Amino acid sequence: MIAVRPIFFLIVATSSLFAAASRASADDGPNIEIWAENPWYWSDRGEPVLLLGGSDDDNLFQWPEADLIAQLDRIAAAGGNVIRNTMSDRKDKGFEEYPFGRRADGKYDLDTWNDEYWTRFERLLSETAARRIFVQIEIWDRFDYVDNGGDERWQIHPYNPANNVNYTYEASGFEPRYPDHPGANRQPFFFTTPKQRNNTVVLRYQERFVAKLLEHSLAYGHVLYCMDNETSGEEEWGAYWAEFVRERAAERGRKVHLTEMWDDWDLRADRHRRTFDHPERYDFVDVSQNNQNKGQEHWDNFLFVREYLSSRPRPMNTTKTYGADRNKLGHTDQDGIERFWRHLLAGAASMRFHRPDSGLGINDKAVAAIRAARKLESLIPLWSVEPANELLGERDDDEAYLAAAPGTAYAMYFPAGGEVTLDLASVDGTFDLRWIDIATGEWGPTAQLTGGARRSIAPPTDGNWGAAIVRRDR
C-alpha cells in the first residue's frame, strides 16, 4: 500500500554555487529564444541560430573532464553547436555517478547529494556555455529504471527500496524487478504525480532531484528542457514536470523552453498531439522518432507536422538522428546522413547525430556532414527558405529535395546522384550554383544558371551532394 503524506521539498542554494553560476552566465553568454522574426527557428541574443551537432554519448556530463573537453572541442571545430544531455546515471561505462549520497553501509540516502554528480553537471553547463554549444536536457530516461534486455539497472538504482534508507517496497509501491521493455510503461516511477497515483512517498524525492537540477541549469541561458526520453507514458506525467520546471524558472525570473519526446515513430499518432496541441505548455516540439523512418516517408512526416503547427509555428528539434552501419536497428551510415540533410531542408531548427552505435555520433562522417551544412548556410540562411519540392520536375521519390525562396535562392540535396529539373520559368536573371560534397564537407564544382525556363540539375557524382543556387544580383 502506498503511504500518502503532504508533499514538501527543500531547495538549498549555497553562495558558492550561485557565484559560480553567475560568473558562467555573464551578459555575453549564450541565451536561446524562439526567433521573433521566424518562430520555426531559434535565436541567440536576438540573432538567428541553426543548431547542428552530434556527440558520442547521450549524457556527456558524466564523462571524465579531459574526455568531455576533447569531445566539446571536436564538436565546436566541426561547426556543431548543440548536444543532447540526458540526466541519466546508468552504469554503462563504469565511471557514471548517481546523484545521491551513499552511506558507509552501502545504502543510499535520497535526502543527501553526491557532490561529484553535480560537479560534473555544472562542468558540462559551464564548458558548453563557453563554446556557445546549446544543451537539450532530458530530465527523465525510462531506460534507467528497468531490468530489460539483460541490464540490471533497477537492481542497483538508488530509487529501488532495496538500495536506500528512505522507503520500503510497501510504502513506495515499487517491486523488486521490472523486466519488461520500458515502452510497456509498467514502472510505477512514472505514475507518481497528483493526477496519476499521487505517490507522495516517491514524488518528494523526484521533485527534490529536479529542483536541484534547476539550481544549476537556470543560471544559464543556453539550455532547452525535454521532460523525457521517447516516453510512452501518460500525458499527466510530462505535464506535471513541465509545470514544475516553468514555475521554478519563474521564481528565478528566468524564461525556459520546454518540450516532451514521444515514442511513436508515426508523427501522425495521437500521442504526439499532446505536444502539438499545447503550445502554452510546450514551447517547441521534438520529433526525433521520425528518424526511425526512411526516404520520402521521412520527409513527408516532418512536413505533416510543419503544416499542423503552421497556425502557431514553433521550433522543431530532432535531437536523435538515427543511422549507423551494423547497429541493431538495421539502419546505415547513409540513413543517418540522409535524415540529417532532409530535416535540414525541411525546416528543422535543431539536428544532432545520435550516439554510436545507433548513430554517427561525432565521427568523421558526421563532422563532414555538419561542415557541409554550414557551407550551405553561409550562402543560404536556412531560415530564409521553405520546403519547395513542388518546384522540382522529373523527380522520383527520394531523389532530390528542395528548400527555396523562389527567384532568390534554392537549397538542394541529392542523396544518391540523379537528375531533376528546377522550375525557373517565372524568374529571370543569373544564378550561381555551388556544389557541396557532403562526404568531405568541402566545396565542389560551380556553374551558372539563367532564369526563364526549367533547368536540369544533376550532381557531379553519385553520393550525397548539397547545392546552393543563389541569384547573382539579389
Image: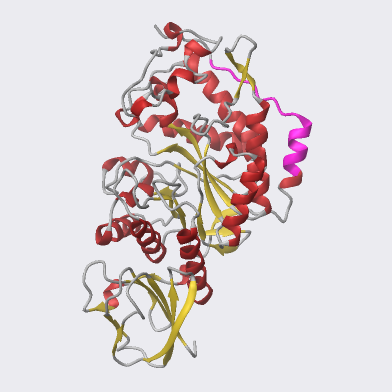
* Quarter of image, res 342: bottom left
Residue 447 in percent (x, y) is at 42, 89
Residue that extends furthest to the front in the rendered view of this protein: 326
Say if 380 sits above or below 214 in the image: below
> Along the horizontal axis of the image, is 394 left or right of 96?
left
Say if 459 sits above or below 41 in the image: below
Asked if residue 13 lies in the magenta stretch, the reply is yes
Asked if residue 417 lies in the magenta stretch, the reply is no
Query: In the image, what residue occupies the spot 49% across and 42% down?
Result: 58
Q: Which residues are magenta?
A: 7-22
Residue 293 in percent (x, y) is at 28, 52
Residue 88 in percent (x, y) is at 51, 33
Query: In the image, what residue occupies the spot 25% across and 58% down?
Result: 297
Residue toward you, 439 or 8: 439
- Quarter holding the N terminus? top left
Is there any visible trace of residue 380 in the rendered image?
A: no
Residue toward you, 286 or 244: 286
Is there any visible trace of residue 417 in the rendered image?
A: yes
> Along the horizontal axis of the image, is 255 left or right of 454?
right
Query: In the image, what residue occupies the spot 58% across and 24% down?
Result: 208
Residue toward you, 59 or 410: 59
